[in-house]
């Protein structure tokens, strides 16, 4: 099987020749990996990664417009943006050249390609700051809902261009979780995030692409909603944030796949190697053969050495083939 076939069949819950593997390795360890392997791409080739996580395309916001509104007001609140023309155009084909080039590179290696795009809460944290936005969810829910709808319009057009570029999946990043619970009331999630995600995911599926969601932390109180929306993949299903694998296997294994299992918060770069080996073997024993893509739970952090990363992926490579 090719990587693309292996990942697609795993997402659909069908039998595959081995567990698909991936890792978010490049953000913090690029120089170290390049020094050891020649490039991050060489590392990915060595371990026969089945997926590629692709960034690129146009950004959503015109920061010059937002900064001008900020300068002219004592506080930048959601009501000041509902009618402002601060979104970029997502309909400029040249803006997707870097995505097209990345997909072409990884399709030569027969990998499943997924393109990241911002969600709603996470996206507007860059505008308001996370503490302010949490406050505004209580004070300006209707106005934030309007902004989220406008972001959904933008994302739908973005997804269309990614489909034309050859993407297999659109990956929506929208961090909602703290360590033990959501950062905000799940009722608000239902009211202003759920309907916009649903509209975006329905459109992605109309393009015959998969849809995945990334959220750090504990999102247990909205996983039923994630199922209802129709997401195909959830990343990372963070066991270290009160999201047990038993919860997934007992309640959601027939609804969506999960990507993760190699925790950067509690295991990789933190545990001693004998402990790390036991942990990776435990996760494989629990999830092997399930709708599971073995991957890091987030970007590998800078405190992880290349030696420990190599140790982990030597073992992952072996276990995926057993």
Image (cartoon, rainbow, N blue to C red):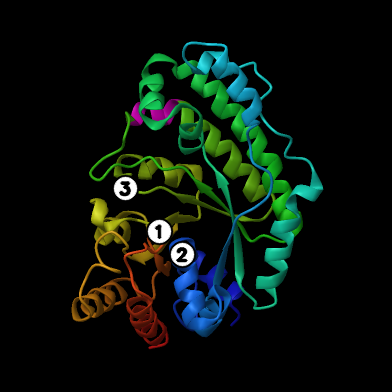
Q: Quadrant of residue 99?
A: bottom right
Q: Quadrant of residue 260?
A: bottom left
In contact (CB < 8 Å): disc 1 and disc 3: no
Residue 190 sits inside the magenta stretch: yes
In contact (CB < 8 Å): disc 1 and disc 2: yes
Lower position in the chain sequence, tag 1 or tag 2:
2
Residue range of the region highlighted in magenta in the rendering: 186-191
Residue 276 sits inside the magenta stretch: no
Indicate left or right for 116 with 33 as reference: right
Q: Position of residue 91 (x, y in %)?
A: 77, 40
Q: Position of residue 261 (x, y in %)?
A: 34, 66
Q: CA distance from mark 1 to mark 2?
A: 6 Å
User: Can see residue 169?
Assistant: yes
Lower position in the chain sequence, tag 3 or tag 2:
2
User: Can see residue 15?
Assistant: no
Q: Secondary structure at mark 1?
A: loop
Give the class, few, some or many, for how many residues have Cα within 10 Å of label 1's Cα (few <14, many ≥20): many
Q: Give the dominant element type of the magenta stretch: helix, strand or loop.
A: helix
Lower position in the chain sequence, tag 1 or tag 3:
3
Nearer the observer, disc 3 or disc 2? 2
Q: Which residue is mark 2?
A: 24
Q: CA distance from mark 3 to mark 2?
A: 17 Å
Q: Secondary structure at mark 2?
A: loop
Looking at the image, which residue is at 71% across and 41% down?
157
Q: Position of residue 27 (x, y in %)?
A: 48, 61
Q: Which residue is mark 3?
A: 217
User: Compared to 166, does 83 lie above or below?
Assistant: above
Nearer the observer, disc 1 or disc 3? 1
Q: Position of residue 160 (x, y in %)?
A: 72, 47
Q: Which residue is mark 1?
A: 298
Indicate left or right for 180 with 288 as reference: left
């Amino acid at each position: 099987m090719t990587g693309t076939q292996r990942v697609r069949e795993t997402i659909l819950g069908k039998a595959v020749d081995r567990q698909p593997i991936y890792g978010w390795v490049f953000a913090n360890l690029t120089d170290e990996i390049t020094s050891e392997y020649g490039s991050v791409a060489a590392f990915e080739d060595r371990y026969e990664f089945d997926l590629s996580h692709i960034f690129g395309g146009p950004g959503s916001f015109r920061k010059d417009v937002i900064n001008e509104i900020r300068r002219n007001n004592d506080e930048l609140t959601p009501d000041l943006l509902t009618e402002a023309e601060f979104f970029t155009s997502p309909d400029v084909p040249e803006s997707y050249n870097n995505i097209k080039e990345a997909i072409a590179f990884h399709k030569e290696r027969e990998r499943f390609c997924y393109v990241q795009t911002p969600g709603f809460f996470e996206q507007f944290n860059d505008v308001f700051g996370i503490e302010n936005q949490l406050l505004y969810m209580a004070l300006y829910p209707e106005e934030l809902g309007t902004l989220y709808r406008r972001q959904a319009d933008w994302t739908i057009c973005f997804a269309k261009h990614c489909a034309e570029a050859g993407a297999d999946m659109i990956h929506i990043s929208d961090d909602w979780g703290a360590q033990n619970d959501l950062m905000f009331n799940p009722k608000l999630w239902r009211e202003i995030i759920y309907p916009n995600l649903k509209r975006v995911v329905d459109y992605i599926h109309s393009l015959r692409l998969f849809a995945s969601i990334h959220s750090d932390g504990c999102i247990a109180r909205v996983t039923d909603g994630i199922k209802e929306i129709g997401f195909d993949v959830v990343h990372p299903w963070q066991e270290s944030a009160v999201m047990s694998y038993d919860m997934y296997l007992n309640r959601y294994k027939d609804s969506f796949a999960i990507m993760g299992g190699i925790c950067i918060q509690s295991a990789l770069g933190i545990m001693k190697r004998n402990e790390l080996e036991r942990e990776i073997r435990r996760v494989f024993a629990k999830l092997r053969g399930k709708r599971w893509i073995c991957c890091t739970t987030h970007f590998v952090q800078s405190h992880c050495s290349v030696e420990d990363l190599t140790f982990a992926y030597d073992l992952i490579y072996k276990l995926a083939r057993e």
